[in-house]
Image (cartoon, helix red, strand yellow):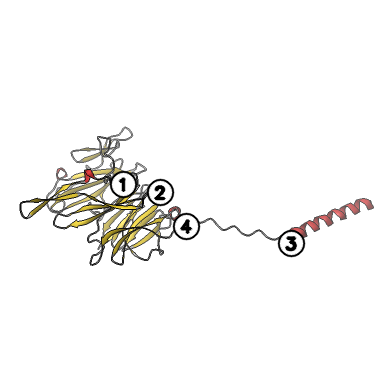
């Protein structure tokens, strides 16, 4: 019995000593929590009055990106989540980029567009900015001819070589002594401005069909008219019917809704609006505050719709899956990215 008692006491002593040793062992440092990249944290990016804003689609909260101190003029977002944008600084228009795959990215200067900005407003003299189809080049329309209503040169930044070249889009041709016309030179440009030609004879894909400017959903073995409830005979008080409009349409990524744009060219611009329809054609209505020329509607992956609408000025709206419309920003919107 004494021997057994001794063994129990010895075992307890070893256990206590082990606990004491563990208690004296220095604690492992806490591992830093893994941070989300900007691309992971935010589902939407937009430029508002020269600032980049980051929008959380889950919480509907917007955060301003503060690492860029110069005013952003134009921007385009690549599929690899790199943002290319132009800023006006010290009388010059510069190209920069921002890698949204980082948790706290800093702007990187890429090139000088060689476009003077003195005496110009943000919308005066700067054309569209876009990527080519392969996303290996960034282009900026430049050198506007106001009386012709077009930009006749294109500045192209090559991402691999980090160089800028200027390509001629239109060539001025004298007609008599005074009138000047412009010949389209874009076919001779190395930059595929409009992407590859569609291999499909149906510009709307295989889900939508245009018959006499009415749009039909023809997917899933169905044939449903999505625009038979739209009356445009008195649109804009100029007595236009559907046959007078050009029309395009797209289906959201979830194949639950379609967006149909009707527009007609008048003078130097276009007028028109968008129609939103459920795929079964039961809910058809004009998209509130939409304008064909400037709304720039964009489907989000979950089927929500972003567009610039007008309510005492331009506003950025988000139309959710339930048909609710939310204002994201209430001042002039120059670029919407996602």
User: At numbered mark 4, what does the secondary structure look like: helix, strand or loop?
Assistant: loop
Q: Which residue is mark 2?
A: 80
Q: Residues within 10 Å of mark 4 (few under 14, many from 20)?
A: some
- The mark nearer the N terminus, 2 or 3, is 3
- The mark nearer the N terminus, 3 or 4, is 3
Q: Nearer the viewer, residue 15 or 213?
A: 15
Q: CA distance from mark 2 to mark 1?
A: 14 Å
- The mark nearer the N terminus, 1 or 4, is 4
Residue plotted at (18% across, 52% down): 271
- Percent from the top left, x then y, of residue 101? 44, 53
- The mark nearer the N terminus, 2 or 1, is 2
Q: CA distance from mark 1 to mark 4?
A: 27 Å
Outermost residue toward the right in this view:
2
- Percent from the top left, x then y, of residue 169? 21, 49
- Percent from the top left, x then y, of residue 17? 80, 58
Is 276 left or right of 176, judged from the image as shown? right
Q: As displayed, is residue 257 above or below residue 87?
A: above
Q: CA distance from mark 3 to mark 4?
A: 37 Å
Q: Which residue is mark 1?
A: 132
Q: Which residue is mark 4?
A: 103
User: At numbered mark 3, what does the secondary structure look like: helix, strand or loop?
Assistant: helix
Q: Is residue 68 visible?
A: yes
- Percent from the top left, x then y, of residue 234? 14, 50
Q: Which residue is mark 3?
A: 24
Q: Nearer the viewer, residue 61 or 146?
A: 146
User: At numbered mark 1, what does the secondary structure look like: helix, strand or loop?
Assistant: loop
């Amino acid at each position: 019995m004494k021997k057994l008692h001794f063994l129990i006491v010895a075992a307890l002593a070893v256990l206590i000593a082990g606990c004491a040793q563990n208690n004296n062992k220095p604690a492992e440092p806490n591992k830093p929590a893994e941070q989300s990249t900007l691309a992971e944290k935010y589902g939407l990016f937009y430029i508002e009055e020269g600032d980049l804003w980051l929008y959380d689609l889950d919480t509907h909260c917007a955060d301003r990106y503060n690492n860029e101190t110069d005013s952003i003029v134009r921007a385009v977002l690549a599929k690899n989540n790199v943002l290319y944008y132009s800023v006006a600084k010290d009388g010059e228009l510069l190209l920069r980029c921002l890698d949204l795959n980082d948790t706290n990215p800093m702007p990187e200067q890429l090139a000088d567009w060689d476009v003077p900005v003195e005496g110009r407003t943000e919308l005066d003299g700067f054309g569209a900015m876009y990527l080519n189809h392969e996303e290996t080049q960034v282009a900026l329309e430049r050198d506007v001819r106001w009386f012709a209503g077009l930009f006749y040169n294109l500045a192209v930044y090559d991402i691999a070589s980090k160089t800028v070249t200027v390509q001629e889009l239109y060539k001025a041709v004298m007609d008599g002594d005074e009138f000047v016309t412009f010949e389209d030179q874009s076919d001779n440009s190395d930059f595929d401005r409009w992407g590859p030609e569609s291999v499909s004879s149906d510009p709307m894909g295989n889900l939508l069909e245009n018959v006499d400017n009415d749009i039909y959903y023809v997917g899933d073995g169905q044939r449903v008219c999505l625009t038979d409830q739209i009356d445009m005979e008195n649109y804009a008080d100029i007595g236009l019917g559907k046959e007078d409009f050009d029309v395009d349409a797209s289906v959201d990524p979830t194949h639950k809704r379609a967006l149909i744009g009707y527009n007609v060219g008048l003078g130097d611009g276009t007028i028109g609006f968008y129609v939103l329809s459920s795929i079964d054609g039961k809910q058809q209505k004009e998209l509130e505050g939409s304008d064909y020329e400037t709304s720039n509607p964009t489907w989000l992956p979950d089927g929500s719709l972003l567009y610039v609408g007008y309510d005492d000025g331009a506003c950025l709206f988000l139309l959710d899956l339930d048909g609710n419309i939310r204002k994201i920003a209430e001042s002039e919107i120059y670029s919407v990215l996602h």
